[in-house]
Image (tube, grey):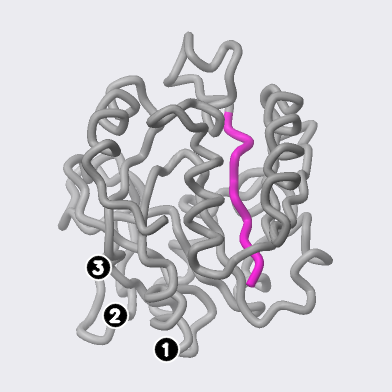
């Protein structure tokens, strides 16, 4: 299976740290975020990874060269975006890379997690859906995409950053997708949360992830993640 690791964001909420370091390269427990993602992906037999870049791409590129050297079974390709395409736009721009795939993973690189990806993949296959969204219980649902599901896991409502959240069940930024999902991505700048997922309500499924997850997109969350990660049992 192949995976998109979305890492092109500017990281403006992490300034001044991101003046010289892309947020996907910020250290957690002495290792860049990308390192922890690659460890997790390899653990679940995902060895072909596309990482998109924009802000300080050379920093990411140099580290990826090292990863490709250290991990003989790993194949990481970089996709530079001169102009940011959006989380769904990146996928649309790389259709050739996944043209032979029956399913693929999409993940936001600024989420720190030890999620059981194999369980998420198994759930996706059991439902035969075009997209499965990983979900978690958020302590700040107003800042997340919030989903509601029926008893079988079908997503019956999805609202990005609602003023009055109806629940705390939030988009984890980890998806398993099948080729049919690509038909719903228009051309140009396209954001998954705002432009695509709300249109797919009633067609896609949600699955609560097993494991730790923290969006490391703010200084406050970055500090929390640094403390919490030391206490988390990692499967690698």
Any magenta on residue 121?
A: no
Q: Which residues are magenta?
A: 1-9
> Which quarter shows the N terminus?
bottom right
| Residue mark closest to the camera, 1 vs 3 | 1
> Which quarter shows the C terminus?
bottom left
6 vs 25: above or below = below
Can you give x and y, in whole percent of width and height, for residue 157 in the image? 30, 67
Q: Kindly identify which residue carries mark 3.
A: 148
Q: Earlier in the sequence, mark 3 or mark 2?
A: 3
Q: How far apart are the alpha carbons under marks 3 and 2?
A: 9 Å
Q: Earlier in the sequence, mark 1 or mark 2?
A: 1
Identify which residue is drawn at 73% across, 48% down.
188
**Which secondary structure, mark 3?**
strand
140 vs 176: above or below = above
Q: Kindly identify which residue carries mark 1.
A: 127
Identify which residue is drawn at 69% across, 57% down.
74
How many labels sit on residues?
3
Can you give x and y, in whole percent of width and height, for residue 190 in the image? 62, 50
70 vs 170: above or below = above
Q: Are marks 3 and 2 in contact (CB under 8 Å)?
A: no
| Residue mark closest to the camera, 3 vs 2 | 2
Q: Quadrant of residue 116?
A: bottom left
Q: Is residue 96 left or right of residue 124?
A: right
Any magenta on residue 4?
A: yes
Q: Are marks 1 and 2 in contact (CB under 8 Å)?
A: yes
Q: Quadrant of residue 67?
A: top right
**Which secondary structure, mark 1?**
helix
Identify which residue is drawn at 49% across, 84% down.
129
25 vs 136: above or below = above
Q: How far apart are the alpha carbons under marks 1 and 2?
A: 9 Å
As drawn, the label of residue 153 is: 2
């Amino acid at each position: 299976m192949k995976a998109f690791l979305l890492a092109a964001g500017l990281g403006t909420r992490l300034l001044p740290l991101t003046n010289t370091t892309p947020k996907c390269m910020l250290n957690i427990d002495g290792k860049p975020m990308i390192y922890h993602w690659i460890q997790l992906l390899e653990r679940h037999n995902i060895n072909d990874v596309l990482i998109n870049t924009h802000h300080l791409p050379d920093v990411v590129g140099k580290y990826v060269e090292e990863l490709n050297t250290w991990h003989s079974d790993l194949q990481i390709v970089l996709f530079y975006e001169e102009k940011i395409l959006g989380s769904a736009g990146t996928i649309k721009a790389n259709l050739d890379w996944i043209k032979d795939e029956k399913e693929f993973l999409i993940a936001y690189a600024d989420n720190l997690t030890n999620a059981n990806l194999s369980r998420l993949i198994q759930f996706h296959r059991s439902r035969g859906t075009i997209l499965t969204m990983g979900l978690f219980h958020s302590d700040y649902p107003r800042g997340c995409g919030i989903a509601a599901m029926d008893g079988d896991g079908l997503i019956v409502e999805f609202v990005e950053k609602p003023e009055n959240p109806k629940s705390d069940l939030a988009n984890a930024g980890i998806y398993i997708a099948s080729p049919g999902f690509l038909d719903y991505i228009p051309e140009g700048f396209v954001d998954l949360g705002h432009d695509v997922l709300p249109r797919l309500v009633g067609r896609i499924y949600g699955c609560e992830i097993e494991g730790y997850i923290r969006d490391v997109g703010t200084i406050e969350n970055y500090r929390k993640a640094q403390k919490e990660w030391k206490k988390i049992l990692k499967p690698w």
